[in-house]
Image (cartoon, rainbow, N blue to C red):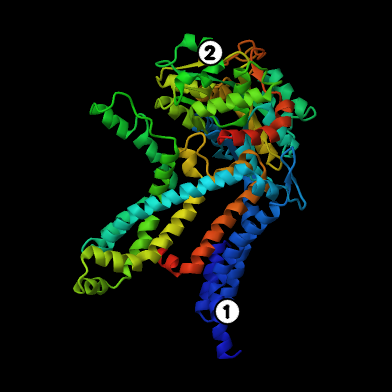
């Protein structure tokens, strides 16, 4: 074997464990889900093997699934916008801080040390009828009766923002860190105010980071099912809850598979659009 | 020679120059692959030898099982009980469906309809009753109903029973109002935003039947039931998904009224909460069993079932989980606490409880569970 041929093989040899893992843990299960989506559930709960389009027909034509999907995308979009509005200033402060950057970054990572479910459930102790806020307001005499704050769409969005905000901050932070500070100074020396230099120089240059953070927040938010389950009211379901119900409650794995592929298709299309315009490189930087 | 020793020798040969790098890495890789391939099967083999997996409802129920049954059983026999939990029979069935035979062994199933459903899916084992002599203490009616589903044989032993009745906060709802309104309290406008309910389709339809004055085992006007479920949904604050969540919502006063599991409400009362409990006419009664799944280590499972049915164990568990045991009060002295538990029947006939007809409910399961899923979300 020539040296060139050996060198050409080396990256594949190094990549082979990761590629094997992706193939076995992602592509093979995905193939199973695709196959399942064409089967049927019988009245006893057993699956009928075959090639049936019934599940796809139901998933694509039923208004119920379309409405829940649109509502899911709406909640994910609101969450992403709130994360951007809250995350950008925080990332800016961290990126521009001088002495305590490491400490601020550590604080940013702290929530990841606690289980996502525990973090979500902590809002019950904060917003509940006998939670911290109501107790404080009652003790101060500002209210006579506890305010009902939990179990609605707002608390679902609040829980999602709590979960996703660090992803936004980290992506924007990485983007801001990569901007040459002398560009802002140059803008100021040419007569721009600090605000104008931010609007015309810093913000446009950090947009790829903002977009990467937005994509992550949107995709993760649209695929969540724990948050609406814990913090949502009777009608605050998201699309992943439908998948859970089809598979777990109704034992209808074929329909659940079709629904999960439908969500995957929508979110995959979004990632493809992002990749077409901005590329995935920024996303990789933000992920570390 | 154990595997560690083998690897040490292999490494020594490699470091001494007795093996080239490619051969050494190849042997390590082959050993890893072999271990990976045999591990899932080895786990089942190990389970057969000295482990039994038990899955139940979690919370105070699991605590009672662990303390009064599993720990003493392990101490006596040396067989370890792996203690898992689930949120409901549907969820557990989905997990079993995705598993290998033998991975799950015993489940604390609720209702004869669940037993029939599992049996219809080919998951039922056949118990050797000679290995479970304590079965003689069980209420005969509870055993017979299971035999009827599986051609006279048993895949489970009955273990306890209870009701899903109405739980209410006495600070906000009086006993008199409950007696007057019954299940209709769950669709009372006055309590809007303070009503809860289990997000389980069977329970919601059962309550809907009671609210519309129908027999839950023979509903004639399903539209009226769906409308009652819609009304409840619009007035409710939250569908709860577990006994722990039910207890938390009531204890924290997030909700004032809901249907609830008799044992969990009794546990709240024991903790000092002023929560009332009543079974409306035709209230939802159920019997739970310990179901052995096909492919399980049968002798170890039968030994555990027999141990759990021993009066001393069964009574201790019942007192811990607050559900009356399946033991016949005519044959066994059940002590002082059990006769005070909700749903307890001193006659041992259980004539006062209404159980779900398995054929009726399983026959409608596919259609109703799906329809409820939509209505639950606002449709």
Instruction: Using residue B53 as the reference point, say whether residue A221 is left or right of it.
Output: left
Callout 1: SS = helix
Quadrant of the image occupied by residue A131: top left
Mark drawn on residue B181: 2
Chain at tag 2? B
| Residue B42 in sight here | yes
Q: Which residue is located at x 40 percent, y 57 percent? A: A167
Total numbered badges shown on the rendered structure: 2
Q: Which residue is located at x 48 percent, y 8 percent? A: B176
Select label 2 or label 1 by which is in front. 2
Considering the image in quadrants, where does the C terminus of chain B appear?
Answer: top right
Badge 1: residue crowd in 10 Å (few <14, some 14–19, many ≥20): few
Where residue A228 appears, as percent x and y from the top left, is 48, 41
Where residue A247 appears, as percent x and y from the top left, is 63, 44
In the displayed structure, would residue B111 be above or below residue B49?
above
Residue at the far bottom: name it. A2
Badge 2: residue crowd in 10 Å (few <14, some 14–19, many ≥20): some
Decide: marks 2, 1 in contact (CB < 8 A)?
no
Considering the image in quadrants, where does the N terminus of chain B appear?
Answer: bottom right
Quadrant of the image occupied by residue A32: bottom right
| Comes first in the chain, label 2 or label 1 | 1
Q: Nearer the viewer, residue A277 or A216?
A: A277
Where residue B231 appears, as percent x and y from the top left, is 55, 25
Q: Which residue is located at x 27 percent, y 30 percent? A: A137
Callout 2: SS = helix
Q: Nearer the viewer, residue B278 or B255?
A: B255
Mark drawn on residue B22: 1
């Amino acid at each position: 074997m020539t040296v060139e041929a050996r060198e050409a093989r080396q990256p594949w040899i190094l990549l082979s464990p990761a590629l094997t893992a992706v193939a076995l843990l992602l592509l093979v299960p995905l193939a199973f889900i695709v196959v399942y989506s064409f089967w049927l559930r019988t009245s006893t709960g057993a699956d009928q093997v075959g090639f049936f389009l019934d599940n796809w027909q139901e998933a694509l034509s039923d208004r119920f699934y379309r409405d829940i999907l649109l509502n899911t995308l709406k909640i994910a979009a609101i969450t992403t916008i709130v994360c951007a509005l809250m995350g950008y200033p925080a990332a800016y402060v961290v990126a521009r801080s001088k002495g305590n950057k490491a400490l601020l970054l550590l604080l940013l990572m702290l929530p990841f040390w606690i289980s996502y479910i525990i973090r979500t459930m902590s809002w019950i102790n904060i917003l509940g009828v006998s939670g911290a806020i109501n107790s404080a307001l009652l003790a101060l005499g500002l209210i006579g009766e506890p305010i009902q704050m939990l179990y609605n769409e707002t608390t679902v969005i609040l829980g999602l923002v709590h979960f996703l905000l660090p992803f936004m901050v980290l992506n924007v932070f990485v983007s801001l860190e990569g901007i040459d500070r002398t560009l802002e100074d140059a803008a100021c020396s040419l007569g721009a105010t600090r605000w104008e230099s931010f609007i015309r120089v810093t913000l446009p240059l950090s947009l790829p980071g903002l977009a990467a953070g937005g994509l992550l927040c949107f995709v993760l938010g649209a695929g969540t099912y724990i948050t609406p389950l814990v913090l949502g009211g009777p009608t605050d379901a998201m699309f992943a809850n439908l998948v859970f119900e089809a598979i777990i409650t109704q034992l209808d794995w074929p329909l659940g598979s079709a629904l999960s592929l439908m969500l995957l298709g929508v979110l995959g299309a979004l990632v493809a659009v992002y990749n077409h315009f901005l590329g995935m490189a920024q996303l990789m930087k933000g992920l570390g | 020679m154990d595997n560690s020793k083998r690897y040490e020798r292999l490494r020594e040969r490699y470091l001494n120059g007795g093996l080239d790098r490619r051969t050494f890495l190849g042997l390590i890789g082959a050993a890893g692959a072999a271990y990976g391939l045999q591990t899932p099967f080895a786990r089942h083999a190990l389970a057969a030898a000295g482990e039994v997996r038990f899955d139940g409802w979690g919370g105070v129920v699991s605590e009672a099982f662990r303390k009064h049954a599993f720990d003493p059983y392990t101490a006596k026999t040396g067989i370890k009980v792996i203690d898992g939990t689930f949120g409901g029979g549907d969820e557990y069935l989905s997990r079993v469906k995705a598993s290998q035979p033998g991975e799950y062994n015993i489940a604390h199933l609720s209702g004869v309809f669940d037993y029939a459903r599992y049996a219809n899916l080919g998951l039922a084992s056949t118990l050797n009753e000679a290995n479970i002599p304590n079965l003689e203490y069980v209420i005969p009616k509870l055993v017979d109903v299971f035999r009827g589903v599986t051609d006279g044989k048993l895949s489970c032993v009955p273990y306890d029973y209870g009701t899903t009745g109405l739980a209410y906060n006495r600070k906000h709802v009086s006993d008199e109002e409950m007696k007057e309104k019954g299940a209709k309290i769950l669709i009372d406008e006055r309590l809007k935003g303070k009503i809860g309910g289990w997000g389980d389709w069977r329970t919601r339809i059962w309550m809907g039947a009671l609210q519309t004055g129908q027999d839950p085992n023979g509903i004639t006007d399903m539209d009226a039931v769906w409308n009652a479920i819609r009304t409840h949904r619009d007035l409710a604050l939250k569908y709860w998904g577990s006994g722990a969540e039910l207890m938390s919502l009531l204890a924290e006063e997030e909700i004032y009224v809901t249907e609830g599991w008799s044992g969990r409400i009794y546990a709240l009362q024991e903790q000092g909460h002023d929560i009332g409990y009543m079974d409306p006419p035709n209230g939802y009664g159920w019997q739970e069993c310990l179901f052995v799944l096909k492919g399980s280590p049968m002798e170890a499972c039968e030994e555990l079932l027999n141990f759990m049915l021993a009066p001393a164990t069964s009574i201790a568990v019942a007192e811990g989980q607050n559900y009356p045991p399946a033991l016949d009060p005519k044959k066994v002295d059940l002590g002082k606490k059990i006769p005070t538990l909700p749903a307890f029947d001193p006659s041992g006939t259980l004539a006062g409880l209404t159980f779900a007809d398995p054929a009726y409910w399983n026959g409608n399961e596919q259609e109703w569970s799906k329809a409820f899923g939509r209505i639950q979300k606002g449709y």
